[in-house]
Amino acid sequence: MGTRDDAPPTYEEAARARSIRNAWALSAPALFVLLIAASGPLLIVLVYSFLTPGKYGNVEWAFSLDGWRGILFTKDIFDDTLQLADAHLTIFWRSVKLSLLTTLFTFLVGFPTAWFIATRPPKARAVWLFLITIPFWTNLLIRTFAINEVIRNEGLFNTVMIALGIFETPLRIINTDAAVLMGMTYVYLPLMVLPLFAAIDRFDMKLLEAGYDLYASRWQVLRRIILPIVKPGIVAGSILVFVPSLGAYVTPRVLGGGKNMMIGNFIELQFGQGRNWPLGAALSMTLLIIVMAALLIYVRAASKGGHGHG
Amino acid sequence: MAEANFQPTRIPGFATIAILAFVCLYLPIFTLVAYAFNAGTSIAVWEGFSLHWFGKAWANEAVKDATLRSLTIATVAAIIATSVATLAALGTTRRAGFRGQTAIYVMINQPLMVPEIVTAVALLIFFGMVKTWTGYQGLGYLILAHSAFCIPFAYLPIRARLEGMDLSLETAANDLYASDWQTFRHVTLPLLAPGILAGAMLAFVISLDDVVITEFVKSGGQDTLPTYMLGQMRRAITPEVNAISTGLLGLTVILLTAFFLLTRKKD
């Protein structure tokens, strides 16, 4: 390299340099919009997490670790000792538990659904696929509201059950963890089905015949042939469901009532009535770190599986 | 089981679960839509067909206002997002890989990765600062926020379309002494148009649907249709909300059908 530095660039080198310049110039407007209205402000959240809460919301510009400490601990009002914040732990545990269960349930329902779609004849398959895509793109709020219509105390489910004489009084589902779980499973199901479908669609069905020819049972074929091969799809679907579940805001707010908060609602609380912006900022950063870690695991798993564009 | 009918791709129970899943997926939506046409005030008891609630929603000044605002924001944000996404797609496809390319991808797809509530909080803080500095309270903040998170949705179909186009036609145009601009205007752009339109429609739908970021960024009196509905859900729900949802749902289905027809691969 060193000796060639003074030599005039060859035609190829010049063309290459121009190509890279063009690439950046063309991308610049998009990057600028994203920098001011998406990525850049995240840095401000990081800064805010190290400041002192203001009396009427917002912050005072004085360094403090209380925001981060407040995630797990509360200060005793009498003797300033730190104690584990049980209320916060309950919210974290609920968020993680409901997100994991949502991922599990969407998989248990989503895998057979994706398999069903992928094994239809081509024309019917396009229709089924379209049917799963419509809810995927439908407003999350509308879908949450729709499931609310069904499980409310005076909703479809209870009305039918009481009319049939199965229940005497309505079954209380709304404003419980179960309602949030049902709602999240409902709204995030398409996110699980679509990547699973993509993986199953690439699956060579001849392998099944090979398995059965070698006297494998149905269960063995499922466990030893199908699941290992579609694993990248399972990982992708799980991440796609787990990540938005963990950060869910609308579904727990509408279906969980005020008490069954998840991290998303807890963050909002700090910027509203809680008036503890640094704690809210620290919680946001924590959520972001967990989500990034999950995505990193996904990227690792996807590249190991040899499917670069999973 | 008769061996002749043995289908290796069939797994017992899967079809049943799948059909049940589709029923569960659509039943609540159909219920929601059905009660929008209910004559009575209840969303549980059916009292006959009527368009009453659509009329009532439309006569409601707040709903009309929110609808207009939603459409304005979605239109402007979709135009901005699609324009910058088209340029970015042209910049990042069909050329040799270069250092920094991954950084550009990550940056463009960032809104898909960061939880919405985190972006919402970040924009609440940042735009709050800007509001204090400049005194400007208008729709610009919502438009800017929407433009940003719509970029990846506009970018992906455009990029997919570009990757399917080879450079031979552009090279031919250049060989025939077309200027770079002429080549772009008369060769690249017409070929790319379906991708751009598809991207714009996705961006429009995504903007129209947003709740969380809008809820945090909006100033007083800047409700969009979804934030208005979220506010209504705290009170007693009337079929008016069903009517609004049905309208929004109808618009989404129309746009998505158009999107599928546009991006359908011709076999």
Image (tube, rainbow, N blue to C red):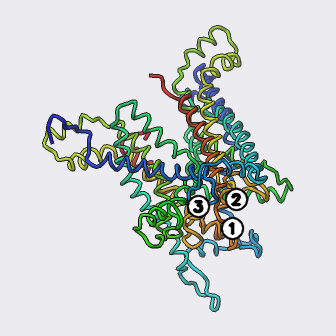
Residue in front for this viewpoint, A119 or A298: A119
Relative to A233, A17 lies left or right: right
> Residue reaching furthest right?
B135
Quadrant in the picture for the N terminus of chain B:
top left
Q: Which residue is mark 2?
A: B216
Do the residues under discs 3 and 1 have CB atoms within 8 angstroms?
no
The kind of residue tagged 3 is Tyr
**Circle number at residue B222:** none
Task: Please tell me whether mark 2 sits on a helix, a strand or a loop.
Answer: helix
Identify the mark at residue A271; answer none if there is no mark.
1
Q: Can see residue A309?
A: yes
Q: How many marks?
A: 3
The answer to which of marks 3 and 1 sits earlier in the sequence is 3
- Helix, strand or loop under label 1: helix
The answer to whether A32 appears left or right of A257 in the picture is right
Instruction: Give the alpha-carbon distance from disc 1 to disc 2, as whole Å.
Output: 10 Å
Disc 3 and disc 2 on one polypeptide chain: no
Are marks 1 and 2 in one subunit? no
Tell me if label 1 and label 2 are in contact, CB under 8 Å: yes
Q: CA distance from mark 3 to mark 1?
A: 14 Å
